[in-house]
Image: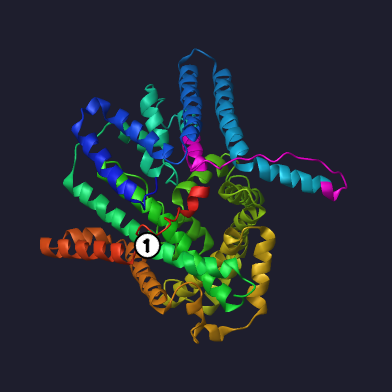
């Protein structure tokens, strides 16, 4: 079931209505049933994978708690807890590896052996990637680690824990919630609040704008250019790559915002997943603002356990590269994703290495780092670096990404930006300029967010007639300019494939 579908717009009110009517003691059971139904609308049998991950991590939490309460000496207790954590991680990651990486691993192995003139006949597995498997697997694993670190109690009620793993708003594309935030909220349900429901609906409305008005419209242009980059070379690719940066942001942030709004209606707060990332002044700053739940997950459960920055600069740089290479692989079973992750890690390592030189240049030239011009230069430079890496993310294969870069720089055709040629890439002149107007709206909203101005709070504070007029206009705008209708093939969110 997609957020941008009529089915969901029927499903959510029913779930919310029943949730607030039924007794408090069984609210979590209703949400659990609704969450499994939501997921099973894609593929019912793959609900067994969520159930398996839930059982494994639930038992691991109980075992860790039991070991803590046993009269073992400290070293034995620590060793046993580590074995339980290792077992939970290994089993879950093996399941993830099989469904997501087995064919990639076998193809890579075949190519490696072929390079040394050894031919092997590796089998090919016909596997459909389960929707959201990377998200709920990481969420379940974080619970095991949190119990191990004493950050959260071991949940004794299996059904409450199962709801934590499968909570439908953020089940298939995040944000990847922490147990100490979500599990505690699910354990203590709240009464209906008109104010929070209103805020949730405003969040959902903004999310729908990002997804069906902006991201899906941009996707038409990007798909045409990237689908035939030989014909649409040069500045076509430059423009399409810049637009893809906006597309993936609106697509993913749109999902996260709708998820936050949906949960808010149920009086549950999910973490913010994006914080105006394209206003970042460095790549490191970008990754503090982009996909925050995943970035913080890797920081807490991979970077810090590897040693973080505590063991010298070289080890710190090595740890960062490991994190970003793994992050790239998490996004997809392809070398292009690994290169994308590696590039973002390399940007940060080089940035830190050059920091003393940059500091010295600022002092010598007497530059003001707080000035608007200085910040704009850094924002543009960061966007260029991040946007270049998106080529490897968007391309189907690493070799295709290299070809796209070659055709992008080989053809010098800036006139296509002014002679109307760009209106032949799937969007006519009206839709193209509607897209540009919506991008301006997005930039304005992100600038407000960067300045800690919450637009929905500003709207709510206005007179009732203005509020309802604004909301009616916004709903009409999304419905009229969004990609709805029986003839429209609803577009999946990009991150569903991860």
The reply to whether the magenta stretch includes residue 56 is no
Q: Can residue 68 be seen from the camera position used here?
A: yes
Rendered view: 100 above or below 236: above
Residue 495 screen position, x and y as percent: 49, 51
Which quarter of the picture shows residue 473?
bottom left
Give neighbour class at mark 1: few <14, some 14-19, many 20+ (Cα, 10 Å): many
Q: Is residue 105 above or below residue 464?
A: above
**Count of numbered badges drawn on the protein:** 1
| Residue labelled with disc 1 | 483
Visible residue check, residue 300: no
Is 144 drawn above or below residue 39 in the view shown? above
Q: Residue at x 78, y 45 (%)?
A: 110
Q: Is residue 117 magenta?
A: yes
Q: Residue furthest top?
A: 71
Residue lying at 21% horizontally and 30% vertically, measured from the top left = 22
- The quadrant of the image that shows the N terminus is top left
| Image coordinates for residue 491, horizontal then vertical, percent | 44, 56
Residue drawn at x 73%, y 47% is 108
In front of the other: 333 or 179: 333
Which of 393 and 290 lies nearest the eye of the viewer?
A: 393
State left or right for residue 144 relative to residue 124. left
In the rendered image, residue 95, in percent from the top left (x then y), is placed at: 58, 33
Question: In x, y percent, where is residue 50?
Answer: 47, 33
For residue 112, side relative to residue 271 (left or right): right
Q: What segment is highlighted magenta in the picture?
A: 114-142
Give the SS element for disc 1.
Answer: loop
- Colouring scheme applied when the structure was drawn: rainbow
Which residue is at the front of the view, 452 or 163? 163
Identified at 32% across, 65% down, the residue is 448
Report the residue that reaches farthest toward the front. Answer: 487
């Amino acid at each position: 079931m997609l957020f941008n579908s009529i089915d969901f717009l029927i499903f959510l009110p029913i779930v919310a209505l029943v949730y607030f009517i039924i007794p408090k003691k069984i609210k979590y059971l209703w949400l659990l049933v609704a969450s499994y139904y939501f997921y099973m609308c894609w593929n019912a049998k793959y609900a067994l994978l969520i159930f398996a991950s839930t059982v494994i991590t639930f038992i691991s939490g109980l075992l860790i708690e039991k070991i803590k309460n046993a009269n073992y000496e400290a070293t034995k207790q620590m060793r046993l807890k580590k074995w339980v954590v290792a077992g939970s991680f290994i089993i879950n990651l093996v399941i993830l590896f099989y469904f997501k990486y087995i064919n990639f691993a076998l193809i890579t192995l075949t190519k490696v052996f072929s390079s040394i003139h050894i031919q092997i006949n590796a089998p090919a597995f016909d596997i459909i990637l389960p929707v959201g498997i990377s998200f709920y697997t990481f969420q379940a694993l974080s619970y095991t680690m949190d119990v191990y670190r004493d950050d959260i109690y071991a949940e004794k009620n299996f059904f409450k824990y199962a709801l934590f793993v499968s909570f439908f708003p953020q089940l298939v594309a995040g944000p990847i919630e922490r147990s100490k935030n979500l599990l505690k909220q699910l354990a203590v349900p709240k009464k209906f609040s008109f104010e929070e429901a209103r805020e949730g609906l405003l969040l959902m409305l903004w999310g729908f704008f990002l997804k069906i008005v902006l991201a899906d419209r941009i996707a038409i242009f990007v798909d045409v250019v990237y689908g035939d980059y030989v014909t649409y070379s040069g500045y076509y690719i430059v423009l399409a790559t810049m637009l893809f940066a906006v597309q993936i942001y609106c697509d993913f942030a749109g999902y996260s915002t709708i998820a936050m709004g949906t949960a808010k209606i149920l009086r549950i707060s999910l973490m913010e997943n994006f914080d105006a990332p394209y206003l970042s002044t460095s790549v490191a700053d970008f990754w503090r603002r982009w996909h925050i739940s995943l970035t913080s997950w890797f920081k807490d459960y991979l970077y810090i356990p590897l040693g973080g920055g505590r063991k010298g600069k070289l080890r710190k740089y090595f740890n960062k590269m490991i994190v970003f290479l793994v992050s790239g692989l998490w996004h997809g079973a392809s070398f292009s994703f690994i290169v994308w992750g590696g590039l973002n890690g390399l940007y940060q390592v080089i940035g830190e290495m050059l920091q003393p030189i940059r500091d010295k240049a600022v002092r010598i030239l007497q530059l003001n780092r707080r000035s608007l011009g200085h910040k704009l230069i850094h924002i543009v430079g960061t966007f260029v670096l991040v946007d270049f890496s998106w080529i490897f993310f968007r391309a189907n294969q690493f070799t295709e990404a290299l070809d796209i870069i070659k055709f992008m720089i080989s053809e010098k055709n800036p006139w296509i930006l002014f002679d109307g040629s760009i209106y032949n890439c799937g969007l006519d002149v009206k839709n193209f300029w509607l897209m540009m107007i919506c991008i301006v709206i997005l930039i304005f909203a992100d600038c407000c967010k960067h300045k800690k101005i919450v637009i929905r709070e500003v709207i709510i504070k206005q007179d009732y007639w203005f509020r309802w007029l604004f909301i009616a206009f916004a709903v009409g705008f999304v419905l009229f300019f969004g990609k709805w209708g029986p003839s429209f093939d609803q577009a999946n969110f990009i991150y569903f494939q991860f």
